[in-house]
Amino acid sequence: MNVVLGPNNYGKAETRLVHVRRDRAEHELADLTVSVALAGDLAGTHLHGDNAALLPTDTQKNTVYAFARDGVGQVETFALRLARHFVDSQPSITRSRVAIAEHGWRRLGPHSFARTGECTRTVVASYDGSTSWVVSGITDLVLLNSTGSEFHGFVRDQYTTLPDADDRILATAVRANWRHLGADEKDWDTSFAAAREALVGAFVNTYSLSLQQTLYAMGAAVLGVDGIVEVRLSLPNKHHFLVDLAPFGLDNPGEVFYAADRPYGLIEGTVLREDAPPAGLAWSLTG
Amino acid sequence: MNVVLGPNNYGKAETRLVHVRRDRAEHELADLTVSVALAGDLAGTHLHGDNAALLPTDTQKNTVYAFARDGVGQVETFALRLARHFVDSQPSITRSRVAIAEHGWRRLGPHSFARTGECTRTVVASYDGSTSWVVSGITDLVLLNSTGSEFHGFVRDQYTTLPDADDRILATAVRANWRHLGADEKDWDTSFAAAREALVGAFVNTYSLSLQQTLYAMGAAVLGVDGIVEVRLSLPNKHHFLVDLAPFGLDNPGEVFYAADRPYGLIEGTVLREDAPPAGLAWSLTG
Amino acid sequence: MNVVLGPNNYGKAETRLVHVRRDRAEHELADLTVSVALAGDLAGTHLHGDNAALLPTDTQKNTVYAFARDGVGQVETFALRLARHFVDSQPSITRSRVAIAEHGWRRLGPHSFARTGECTRTVVASYDGSTSWVVSGITDLVLLNSTGSEFHGFVRDQYTTLPDADDRILATAVRANWRHLGADEKDWDTSFAAAREALVGAFVNTYSLSLQQTLYAMGAAVLGVDGIVEVRLSLPNKHHFLVDLAPFGLDNPGEVFYAADRPYGLIEGTVLREDAPPAGLAWSLTG
Amino acid sequence: MNVVLGPNNYGKAETRLVHVRRDRAEHELADLTVSVALAGDLAGTHLHGDNAALLPTDTQKNTVYAFARDGVGQVETFALRLARHFVDSQPSITRSRVAIAEHGWRRLGPHSFARTGECTRTVVASYDGSTSWVVSGITDLVLLNSTGSEFHGFVRDQYTTLPDADDRILATAVRANWRHLGADEKDWDTSFAAAREALVGAFVNTYSLSLQQTLYAMGAAVLGVDGIVEVRLSLPNKHHFLVDLAPFGLDNPGEVFYAADRPYGLIEGTVLREDAPPAGLAWSLTG
């Protein structure tokens, strides 16, 4: 048997960076969790423990902090700066991926903030030495429609007991990532706001016959934002079960629900422009 | 050796209830996690497995859902209804505590909502068959001041290495609970909003020489809300450490921070009105 | 309205300490999470931000590490050393509490270990300048009996739907804490092992008519260990519901279960020796 | 702009199944979390809310429970049974993936068990209507070597401050998945035990110059188990930093460490047999 090394990468994960912009009357706050992954010619360290081509993950962490000295700006831009730096400065590194989660804060005063937990903005920037890719995203956006959702007409086999539903609660925790056409400088903040608005708008305004239908509508809406060519969504179906109150002599006209934790439906899908260019390294360091 | 049964209680914890009020053009949503604890003459089940005096926790869960059929209303009121029911209807039960966490949702449309994660409103209602106590509270309210905080003049012993700080980030995740003078019907929502505003205002506006000083100011501010007699605060000091950028030839004038997870300072304290009546069962079923 | 400061404490929480004993052929590993809480005359910092009486929590962390230089030994002893140090060395500090969670590792070789996740050993040592208290404990010990558990004969009211069970799964995640008679040096490791064995043995060997009955039996068993005078148990009832397979033409003779997350029953109780001395600060810094 | 539906799948995630085998003096316990994902011709539901081809996720959950009525057996076999069922019985479903996490329990008596937390066994079985793939794995296996690990000779750039280490703690939480040559019936339990032993043995016995070197050794060792052709490892470097005790007049000869949470190094790599057949759907429903 011959054993060989396959795809591999390494990096510093979850570096917690808070940046305060103090050169103005109202401080600005950026709160990021930054994860770096690098790939290239790393056979030496794997096969022989020869680290001559290995930039320590500790250095990667230092680099994140040092780069922040110039300010963070839009997270897509910061991720691209870092992704390009590692490949451009390290001969052994040929591909990089920098993932950032930006935690939101709401202004309370010139120097005061409250952390918002409504969702987290994410970005993954990848680079192969010549081309860059940017995937923006959102997680933990929990949405609920209290009506306007049905589910029926599905397959029934010998294990099916689910009754038809003509008016149910539809709730999900949105995880969505969208690929941009290129990585040129643009107003990423505006793009993110538009994509988020599209996701929320489609969820709210789609009369839903299945969570899949809502997923597709949400993806299609995001593709209406300039420069976005592909959207991947992962939507848990956060089940709300109507409680049977009949044993207590009560009806339950869609008012009292049990919110279940597990199990949950999980709907995952991709919606893309027909003319979307190949994804390259956008979704994975191995392409 | 003689072994005896000491204080004990039991109940159903973390019943997840979502209530939709549908009798209006705009639905209203209540999303609660309800925990019940009951105490009384429960020696039979402990000593002999004689359950004749034991209302099953499953029944307690059913009761939560059945009571919700009439609507939830203000969570303090709902907690009191439940707390009184169990003692008043069960001869063996002499003390009850109903704790509710209310998860926030923001309206997106007439039937659409986004879950807010900024904080969670809580209540604990207790009852002993004649008197009721209400403790309202808040958790997961994460606040940060990017300046206006110093820390110096502290004790130095042989294990002290901390330098004086004359301008640091002060951040915490507020857990606060406040005891009301009585349990009479009142506008609990307005009271909660005022208490929350007081907490946030005191955090923002206190020039802080220690997190303890901020804690006291926050507690005192909440006591300014009508009918609140005691406040208990638990404030983790979420440390933000200035990163030393000197090895990279850079200064760091209070801009780049490492946000640490563990360890953390933990400051806990009580602030109360001098004329606060005894707490009774407000903080614990055993008084 | 006159506002006053009530009970308060502060300290460094969750200092992560790993100690390697290297002065032997087989290394020994101690993996601890240490939390310190101190109380005393702390009005100055609360009322005026005067920190002259305040030992920084950073110093407390340093102290934990410095004390570990001499070795950790039994966690009860290490906790007592720390608890006594802070009160004895700080004029303003009159009461201390040091809580330690010890994470278990299994030996794989002379210098190699695998972390065990079966449970966590805990200790809380308290000190008031003259008397010390030790409370040992265990968390996350998940136990299950697949038979030998019934539940019936309980109260039925209009909200009760639970059927009698004459053979159910009984499962819980044990959190138990037990108070020792004094804080004199003793073989804490042996005591812990005996207490754990008593808990497990009583769970396994009690034919259970209610989780309360099992709780009492577990507590009483721990009191059989020399020098233990009080036990407090918190036992979630981790419900396993028999799945109804009848719609699929199948019976289910106690074989296929749904393991539920929430809600859960929560049974809490104290079992103590009739001659147990007063608890002092054992359970709380405020006594 | 033309919008199209890309790859998609759906299913019921995290169905909690506990199975008790009672037909013997000593009960046997299986505790599984089962997640199903199905793909095929699902355009109807995405584009039009037409669910005629959609087997509800609720039915998938029911199927898991119904199949368990015949016993669970080895988890690989159970996963394969389920994976094949959905494709073979549903005309619209052409690919399936069933992922199972098996939670360990240790026997305490004929009907009594303690949950072990040392690691979790996993399996992912995939099926496309004719071929099946099996990927076995392990998560949460936390290993530590207290010596026998160095790290030096790495790249130094202007952001590097890490000193050489000639004796450090090496610790990781192993997540490993290995692909089997085929999906024929075999003794999966024995194979799993051998793979786990190989992982642990290689970790313990590799004198390590980098975590990558240890990763490769672990992967190669697993390939020594009959029928395994590819291993993917994800190894966080759980940093243990030597505490500087010099300010307290103490040395620290590799004894006192701070165990950090974040950030952490993350080393990911694949080790495979040179003659490994193509992976098909083993690692992803989209191949």
Image (cartoon, coloured by chain):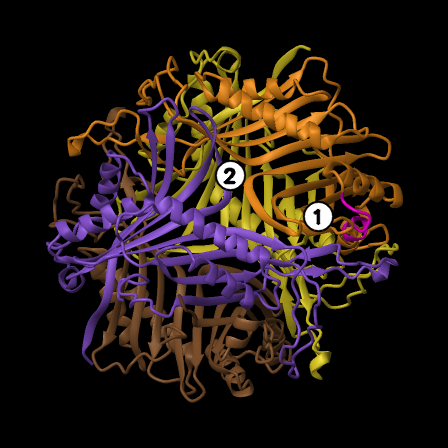
Chain colours: A purple, B orange, C yellow, D brown
**In this orientation, does residue C94 appear?**
no
Label 1 Cα neighbours within 10 Å, binned few <14 / some 14-19 / many ≥20: few
In the picture, the quarter occupied by the C terminus of chain A is bottom left
Circle 2 sits on which residue?
C123
Q: Helix, strand, or loop for circle 2?
A: strand
Does the magenta portion include C186?
A: no
Asked whether the beta carbons under mark 2 and mark 1 sit within 8 Å of each other, the answer is no
Q: Is residue B180 left or right of residue C66?
A: right
Which amino acid type is marked by label 1? Glu
Residue C92 visible: yes
Q: Residue at x 20, y 81 (%)?
A: A1
User: Label 1: which residue?
Assistant: B26
Residue at coordinates 64% horizontally, 57% vertically from top-left?
C238
Q: CA distance from mark 2 to mark 1?
A: 53 Å
Q: Is residue A5 left or right of residue C130?
A: left
Is A227 located above or below residue D250 in the figure?
A: below
Q: Nearer the viewer, residue C139 or B249?
A: B249
Q: How many marks?
A: 2
- Name the spot of residue A120 as percent of width and height, x first: 44, 47
Q: Which residues are magenta?
A: B64-72
